[in-house]
Each structure stands twice: as C-alpha cells, then as structure tokens.
C-alpha cells in the first residue's frame, strides 16, 4: 500500500530564529526513533518536500536536500526514488515545477501534509499576497525572509538565495489530510490570523479553514494571541482527543 | 537495493555502528565505500538512487584513516639496508606484519650505505598499493649518506658523503636512479645542498633535515628551497639553544614561506624522547607532528637475544640494547604503541593522536587527496580501534586485510 506523505521541512525553520529543538527536527527525531525500534518502516512511503532554494548547490549545507538527507533520509529505510525534492538548479524552473505537480498526481495525490508556518502566516514559501489557488512555482523571497535566513549563511546577505521553488496553496489544499505544527510565541499572532480571522491571502495558512481535514498542533505559547474562549474550548476536548491517540507498542509495554 | 548503476555497478559497503574521524573530530556517522574509495552517500542517494549492498557492523569502534609510517628501517628480523638477493621479500614480510599495527602505507627506510647497496636495493622495490598481502609502499626514505659526521648516530662513518658540485651527478652516483624514492634526509649545512634540495623537491621527493649541526638560519634557508620535514626531532641535531635554536627552531620560525608547513618526526616510544620534550614540541607546533616508529629489524621479535647483522641485540620490553650493554640500538615500538603513548604523554585528544599518524604524514608527502583522511574520494584504507586505541581490524581499499584474533 502506498502512502504519500508530504510537506517535510517547513518554512518555519527558515524564518524562525532557530529555537532549541526546532519543531520539524523534533518530529523527524521521533520518526527515526520509531523506525529504529522497528515500529515503523518508510520502505513504501513516498515523500514530497514542499520547497527548495533556487540556485543553491545541492550539497550546500543549507540546502533542503542536505537538511533532509542529514536529519531524516540517511537514518531510515526510505527508498531514494520515493523521496522527491524540487531541484532549484534545474535548467527550466517552470518545467521542474510542473513536473513536480505531475509526480504528485502519479503518486495518487498527497495523503498527509505536515508543515509549519512563518511569523507572517505563510505556508511553504507562499508569502503574504500569494494566490490561495496557486500551484508549484518560483517565488521571490520577501526581504524579511532573506534577512532571517542570513544567519545560516554566515550573516552575509549576498550569499542568501533570493528565490525559491515552492508548492502552492492550492497544491497543499489538494492533500487529503493537513497537519500544521505551530510552536512558540513568535507564531502566536499568525495563529490568531489563521483561525480566528477570515480567509485572507495576506495570511495564506488561513486558506485551510476551507480544507475538509486539517488539524493545527500547537504548544501553549503559540496560543498567546487567541481568545481565552478559543483556547479553553480546545483544551476542554483534550481528554477525549488523548484517548483517540493509540499508544505505540513500545509505550504500551512500559505501561 | 543497490544503485541504479548509472555511475558504477561495483558493490557498495556501509560501515555502521562506528565513530569516524572526519573534519578533525570523531563523528557518529556511517562510512560508505565503493571501488576501494570513500563514497559520498548523499550523492549516491540523490544522483543514483542507490544504497548499500552490504553492511559492516563496526561494534562501536573508532574508524580512523590507516596509519602511515614514513621512517621504518625493518622489522621481524628484516633489515631493509641489508643488500640481499630478494629485498622485495623482506619488504613484503614487514608490509604484511605492520597491518597488525594499523599501518596501511609506509616508506621503507635505508640508513647510510655504500653506493653498491643503493644500486642493488632500490630497483628491487617499486611504489605499489597495499592489499591483502600487506601495507602499501609509498617509496623509499633515504636517510643519508649526505649527513654530518658529527651527528652520524649509528650510521657508518666511512660511507658518509658530501656534495661535489651539488648537481644530479652526486645523487645518481650514490643512489643510482631516484624512481621509487619518496624522501631524502640530508644535512643542510653541507655546501651545495641548496641546489640539491631544490632539485629533489622539483622531482616531487620530500626533503628532510636531520643528522645535522645546522643552525636555524641554515635550516630556514633549506626550507625556503623546499625542505619540509625534520627527521626524528631532537635526535642527531644540535640541542635547542635560546640564542640559536638550531633545527628545532623551525617549529616556531617566522621564515617559513606562506601556505607551507614544516613537519617533524617524533619517535614516541617513551624512550627516545623524554615526554616533557615531546610536550614542548607538540605544544609549540601541533599541526606539524608526525609519528614515526624508526623501527629496526628487532621490532616484532620476542624478548631475548637475537643476532642481527653484525651485532647481537637483546630485547627487554620496549628497549632494544646492544647485547651485554645498556646502549640503545634502535626503537622497536610499533606504530599503534606510538599513537597510544603520544596521546598519554601529551594529553592530546584522540583525534590529534590519530591525525599525527595518518593525516600529517599524508600532508607531508603531498598525498592527502588520497590518503590519511576519510574524505569522499580518498582511498578506503582504514583502521578500526577500540577506545584504548588498540587495533581491532585493518582495511585496505575497503577490504579487510587483518583482524585481531582472526
């Protein structure tokens, strides 16, 4: 049975000051742990990363190819032909983007999209003003994004890529299930705009209000800009939600 | 599933459960090998969609580049300077045995000898890669005869030579050809040595200063002309003096040309150099330290008396004496012993101790693209060690060539 799994390595990693235990890294570490315990296999899993810098050599330590290899692929049994990452050095970037959309279709569509958001509410590199029905394409990075990324390029702005290939909002909306990970107080305002205000292309993650199966996973700091009523509502459901999460065999043995 | 064969269909090995020496640190990383060379697994994954054909479980070992010994006079009863009919057999015997010490490449060393010996011995051994039969030969190290009579040490005085006019004729007359020679030790105060140093360097042969009474200025001149090594620092040279540091002063000289490093050999057997002197040298210039065994034919022989050449040698522990005396006749420590002793005496890190026996000699000989490190593309000559730096397994070109308790 093929499982299509998308969206690894989120834009939040590029835009946020690197917190200790960055959210997607923590996620990958857990998955690697489950794999090493024999609880999960990635042999039949297909992945599609949501973005990659344009013009950055693939083996540059800050490329998303490097990130995925070092933090995930090399530790698990995923097959190379099933791991898809946009090629920011393709001769024809537009063709590369179209071909990526085709590969997603061939794989049967995305079953689960996992990603974070930026402080400006973007999903992948769909920065404020992106079309909410956009597809995979080339995007120019916002000045704020470039400045925030400079820390990964020795503080030298001239070395930071100015463009990226990214899946579109529309591409992600086609996924069967969407999981957005939001941690930290610096994301709190974006979370507020995403769920308590209307759908707006200035906060592209708000588009998921119109997706049939999306969950936002947050820590307490991320809820700081929400209404108390909203937070209490969801907290009140946690005792039921926790029962829906099946413990893994290793955890069951411990209990 | 193996690679899509777009680059090569040779089998791929993945060494797992190990710590590898890379980027001057021990990293918890797997090591990938194909076609006898270290492979980049990220390129394999993205370019070839490949992965390993076989896994090698290292049991938590340290994986270091194979050790390189640039000064070894023999061992196991074999003396490289003896003009026998089958020099190659003697070199092969030692080459096979040193695998047990983690040595994967070495320079058979000849002490001062008459021209007839060089003419007979040199042509019998070629530079060649190592393999299951033994460590690789990088070329001869010719220690003498162009050295100082005042610092001859154990070299026979009657065969010492000076340079006539400093041309190739002197070298050809004494050595015969220079094919298969990796390094020459000479005394730079000898007249006309500068042009010899230049000529040897142009031929890609490393020039080492040793068995010499040169002052610092003469030594620095030799370095300007291309000399890059000091033979067994402290031994057979003038002692350090605060107004003329002599050859030892090269460690902190400010007249070394930019971009070049002066390397120096240390016999770290705990006997030939006082540990305090070892520490002074290491702290003054850690990047240049090269561990050498300078082992003699008695290395590897069991304790007791052994006739070797014209003498009888008595082995007691790590000491080899002229029988019936307390005169040291040479060192018999193995390379892995030297690595352990160097680490313990200097207090250096594991990485520094391992690099002194691998990376630094490779840099000295100008072969660090292929040897002395575990970078992608380098030859997969490996030594697997436990945490006490004892050798567990030795590999050459990715194939196992020695295993402890095999």
Image: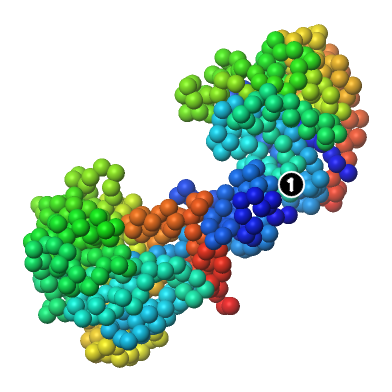
Which residue occupies 20% across, 58% down? B199
Quarter occupied by the C terminus of chain B: bottom right
Q: Is residue A172 left or right of residue B177?
A: right
Q: Position of residue B343 (x, y in %)?
A: 40, 61
Which residue occupies 23% across, 89% down? B310
Q: Nearer the viewer, residue B81 or A12?
A: B81
Identify whether B210 is placed above or below B124.
above
Q: Is residue B186 left or right of residue B23?
A: left
**What subunit carries mark 1?**
A
Which residue occupies 26% across, 42% down? B258
> Considering the numbered disc 1 on the image, is that residue within a helix, a strand or a loop?
loop
- The image quarter containing residue A9 is top right
Which residue occupies 87% across, 36% down? A245
Identify whether A111 is placed above or below B115.
above
Q: Nearer the viewer, residue A248 or A5?
A: A5
Identify whether A204 is placed above or below B142.
above
């Amino acid at each position: 049975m093929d499982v299509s799994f998308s969206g690894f390595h989120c834009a939040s990693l590029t835009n946020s000051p690197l917190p200790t235990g960055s959210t997607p890294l923590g996620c990958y570490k857990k998955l690697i742990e489950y794999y090493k315990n024999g609880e999960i296999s990635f042999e039949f899993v297909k992945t599609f990363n949501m973005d990659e810098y344009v013009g950055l050599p693939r083996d540059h330590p800050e490329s998303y190819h490097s990130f995925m290899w070092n933090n995930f692929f090399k530790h698990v049994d995923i097959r190379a032909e099933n791991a898809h990452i946009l090629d920011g050095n393709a001769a024809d970037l537009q063709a590369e983007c179209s071909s990526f959309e085709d590969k997603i279709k061939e794989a049967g569509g995305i079953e689960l999209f996992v990603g974070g958001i930026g402080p400006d509410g973007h999903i992948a590199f769909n920065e404020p003003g992106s079309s909410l029905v956009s597809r995979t394409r080339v995007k120019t990075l916002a000045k704020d994004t470039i400045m925030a990324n400079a820390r990964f390029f020795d503080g030298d702005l001239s070395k930071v890529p100015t463009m990226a290939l990214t899946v579109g909002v529309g591409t992600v909306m086609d996924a069967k299930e969407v999981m957005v990970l939001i941690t930290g107080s610096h994301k709190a305002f974006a979370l507020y705009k995403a769920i308590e205000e209307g759908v707006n292309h200035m906060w592209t993650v708000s588009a998921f209000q119109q997706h049939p199966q999306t969950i936002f996973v947050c820590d307490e700091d991320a809820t700081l800009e929400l209404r108390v009523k909203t937070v209490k509502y969801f907290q009140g459901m946690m005792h039921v939600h926790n029962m829906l999460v099946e413990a893994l065999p290793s955890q069951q043995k411990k209990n | 599933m193996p690679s899509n064969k777009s680059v090569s269909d040779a089998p791929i090995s993945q060494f797992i459960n190990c710590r590898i020496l890379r980027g001057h640190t021990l990293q918890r990383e797997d090591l990938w090998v194909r076609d006898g060379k270290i492979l980049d697994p990220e390129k394999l994954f993205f370019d070839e969609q490949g992965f390993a054909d076989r896994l090698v479980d290292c049991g938590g070992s340290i994986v270091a580049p194979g050790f390189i010994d640039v000064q070894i006079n023999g061992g196991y009863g074999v003396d490289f300077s003896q003009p026998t009919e089958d020099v190659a057999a003697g070199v092969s015997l030692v080459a096979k045995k040193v695998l047990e010490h983690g040595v994967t490449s070495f320079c058979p060393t000849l002490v001062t000898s008459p021209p007839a010996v060089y003419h007979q011995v040199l042509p019998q051994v070629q530079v060649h890669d190592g393999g299951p039969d033994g460590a690789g030969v990088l070329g001869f190290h010719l220690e003498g005869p162009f050295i100082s009579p005042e610092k001859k040490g154990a070299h026979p005085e009657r065969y010492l030579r000076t340079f006539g006019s400093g041309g190739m004729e002197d070298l050809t007359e004494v050595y015969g050809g220079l094919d298969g020679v990796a390094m020459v030790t000479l005394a730079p105060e000898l007249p006309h040595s500068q042009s010899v140093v230049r000529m040897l360097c142009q031929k890609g042969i490393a020039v080492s200063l040793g068995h010499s009474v040169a002052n610092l200025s003469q030594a620095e001149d030799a370095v300007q002309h291309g000399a890059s090594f000091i033979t067994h620092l402290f031994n057979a040279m003038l002692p350090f003096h605060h107004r003329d540091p002599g050859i030892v002063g090269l460690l902190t000289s400010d007249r070394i040309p930019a971009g070049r490093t002066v390397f120096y050999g240390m016999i770290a057997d705990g006997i030939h150099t006082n540990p305090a002197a070892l520490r002074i040298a290491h702290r003054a210039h850690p990047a240049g330290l090269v561990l050498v065994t300078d082992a003699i034919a008695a290395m590897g022989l069991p304790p007791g008396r052994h006739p070797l050449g014209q003498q009888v040698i008595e082995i007691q522990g790590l000491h080899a004496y002229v029988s019936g005396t307390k005169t040291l006749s040479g060192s018999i420590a193995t390379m892995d012993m030297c690595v352990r002793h160097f680490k313990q005496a200097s207090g250096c890190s594991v990485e520094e101790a391992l690099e002194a026996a691998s990376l630094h000699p490779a840099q000295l000989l100008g072969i660090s693209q292929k040897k002395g490190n575990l970078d992608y593309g380098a030859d997969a000559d490996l030594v697997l060690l436990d945490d006490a730096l004892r050798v567990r397994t030795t590999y050459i070109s990715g194939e196992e060539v020695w295993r402890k308790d095999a």
